[in-house]
Amino acid sequence: MLSLSSNGSHRVLANTEHVALIEDQTRAATASQAIQDVVTSVRNATPLAKP
């Protein structure tokens, strides 16, 4: 899906499964920040910052 937009970023959390988003506070925070970055970019009509 990344290739469908000129304003995208691909982020990977190595060795992370879905359950880690519930059980691992650090990985959950990283995933949540990525989501927040997209929401902020859309709301402000600004380019998505590269990590």
Image: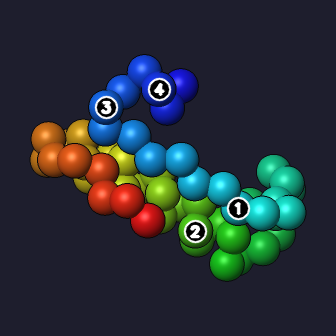
> In the image, is residue 29 above or below residue 42?
below
The image position of residue 22, as x and y in percent, is 77, 62
Q: Earlier in the sequence, mark 3 or mark 1?
A: 3
Badge 1: few (under 14), some or many (20 or more) residues near its Cα, within 10 Å? few
Q: CA distance from mark 3 to mark 2?
A: 23 Å
Q: Nearer the observer, disc 3 or disc 1?
A: 3
Q: Nearer the observer, disc 2 or disc 1?
A: 1
Please, what secondary structure does the residue beneath circle 4 have? Answer: helix
Identify the amino acid type marked 1. Leu
Q: Which mark identifies residue 4?
A: none
Identify the amino acid type marked 3. Ser
Please, what secondary structure does the residue beneath circle 3 have? Answer: loop
Q: Nearer the observer, disc 3 or disc 2?
A: 3
Q: Which mark identifies residue 6?
A: 3
Q: Is residue 22 rendered to the left or right of residue 6?
A: right
Identify the amino acid type marked 2. Thr
Where does label 4 land, which residue?
3
Q: CA distance from mark 3 to mark 1?
A: 22 Å
Q: Earlier in the sequence, mark 2 or mark 1?
A: 1
The image position of residue 47, as x and y in percent, is 22, 47
Tell me the residue at 31%/31% (across/down): 6
Please, what secondary structure does the residue beneath circle 2 have? Answer: helix
The image position of residue 41, as x and y in percent, is 25, 48
Q: CA distance from mark 2 to mark 4?
A: 22 Å
Where does label 1 land, which residue?
13
Where does label 2 land, which residue?
30
The image position of residue 25, as x and y in percent, is 70, 76
Q: Nearer the observer, disc 2 or disc 4?
A: 4
